[in-house]
Image (cartoon, helix red, strand yellow):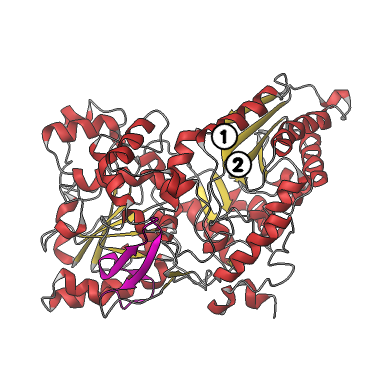
Amino acid sequence: MDKLFLEDRILLQVEKPARYIGNEVNAIYKNKDEINIRFALCFPDVYDIGMSHLGLSILYNLLNQREDLWCERVFSPWVDLDHIMEEENLPLFALESQEPIKTFDFIGITIQYEMCYTNILRVLDLAQIPLLSKDRTEDHPLVCAGGPCVYNPEPISDFIDFFYIGEGEVQLDALMDAYKHHRENGGTKKAFLELAATFEGIYVPAFYDVTYNEDGTIESFLPKHPMAKPQVKKVIMMDMTGSRYPMKPIVPYIQTVHDRVVLELFRGCARGCRFCQAGIIYRPVREKDLEALKEQAIEIVKNTGHDEISLISLSSSDYSHLNDLASHLIEAPELAHVNLSLPSLRIDDFSIELMSKVQDVRKSSLTFAPEAGSQRMRDVINKNISEEDILKGAYEAFMGGWNRVKMYFMLGLPTETEEDVLAIAKLGQDIVNQWFTMPGDMRKQRLQVVLSTSFFIPKPFTPFQWMGQASSDAFLEKSKLINRNINKKNIKYNSHDADTSRIEGVLARGDRKLNEVILKVYQKGARYDAWSEHFDVALWNEAFADLGMDSAFYNERTRELEEILPWDFIDIGVNKSFLHDEFLRAKKGETTVNCMEGCTNCGAMCFEGGICYARKA
């Protein structure tokens, strides 16, 4: 870069100047005069969070492999710099070139959680780009978005020019080729959007009309443009081994949430937990080859200097070659001083042998997610884990030298009773009791069991997408009930914020009318809603009241099966009939086998690969 965008006097006023100066190890720099497309890849949260996201690293690497395109990063400025930029009218800039992103061709926003929606507006505002897509001209960048939240894009459809439904490795190259050719021939932005709409996985909200019934439900959702498809089908990368993985990820100068090498074992999940959106929208399971992972680990460690490798996927212990991979990563001479971590072990697959392999001399805490305290409730959500599995896993952890265990649960699950809530406290105590079954000489350290509860939020494309969400008051009563019934000598209890969960529930299943609410609450000053110290529920309540809207319509109401849902136009491969069958089985407390044990005919076989076909081979 020629020079920093921010002057020294400004950098000296902010908490972490390294968030804004770029030039990190492995950051990519190109000659502006030799490229045709400028792409600002945006994570609408602070640098420390965004730089820990694997998807951002994958897309950054993928796009920058093109010689004709320069992909740069941009994050939400933290509140200290945000204030200065507004006060001095400074435009938001990209880290690599340090140039304003309003001059770029594309701003691509990855949306990982609903509570960043006001930050998306803040990014556009600071970039000096009109918030509403209809107000932008040929002089403004095209604003696109992808990530898990765009599987219901409707609440932010007024702000985004087009959405990418699926995985970036599939269509981004072809889309950029089309843009380059289109622009060289003098095409307009609208004409490009018409062209983009013909691509699989691309949704242009301006090309669709929505009408509503008197009760507020959707009457119709129809294309109004000849290029718009009635159904937008997700695109996914079937050949994970052949996908372009970042071998030289950027190494930040400051500590981020995850300072480590990340190896992606597979995408998708075979388990079928009924509350889990990711487990459905990323189907089918697609594994990466063992030998490829071995090579990637060594190469990335060499290129970054990190001293830890994390094996990640939705359920890492389901990787079919996990033991072989763990053994190799521990024994490889090139990785002699590198620690190995497995952040998503299932307690039923828990083994003292594997646990010993992946931990160094530090016995850090182990984390498991039973999700529910009672067996009845675990059957409702199809967790397919028994109390015996949980207690056995905890005991093995204690025998292995661990004295701190974290357990994650959800409150407010469908059909939940007071007995189910109290079962969380009881299970915590049962785990404590396992500790005291060990010989005394093995209990020299103090035990700590941490129980954490979040509040259940029904998400699109899950069997619970029709269910109502509990109110904030109901959530609080449930958490108080647990708190009154735990043994605080050995158990620590944490609970998520109920108001944040309520708003997240509203945004998760909202329709286009929520664009007005999000715009209104942003104008009232909402920023960093995902951060508890900045979230102000009063602003959201005021926005709903100002617009004469009831938030309970979106989160507390139970939907009828026949109702048109805002996301029904998206085809994820999994059939809606399968989701409804799972919903009925949940109400009966019946479990469903996971994909490794038998095909459930969910519909994901339409992608012609992954576990659906591997099981047949």
Residue at 44% in and 71% down: 235
Q: Which mark is residue 248?
A: none
Depth check, mark 2 against mark 1: the one in front is 1
List the residue tagged with mark 1: 474
x and y, in percent, of residue 255 in the image: 42, 36
97 or 154, nearer to the observer: 154
Amino acid under label 2? Gly
- Amino acid type of the residue that numbered disc 1 sits on in the rendered structure: Ala
- Residue 589, image x, y percentages: 73, 55
Rendered image quadrant of residue 47: top left
The residue tagged with tag 2: helix, strand or loop? loop
> In the rendered image of this protein, does residue 411 appear above or below residue 29?
above
Instruction: Give the spatial CA distance, label 2 vs label 1.
Output: 8 Å
- Residue 307: give x, y in percent of width and height: 53, 43
Question: Which residues are drawn in magenta?
Answer: 197-224
Task: Read off the residue under disc 2.
Answer: 412
**Who's the residue at 67% across and 49% down the image?**
345
- Was residue 205 drawn as part of the magenta stretch in this picture? yes
Question: Does 416 sit left or right of 519 as displayed?
Answer: right
* Picture coordinates of residue 349, whole percent (x, y): 75, 52
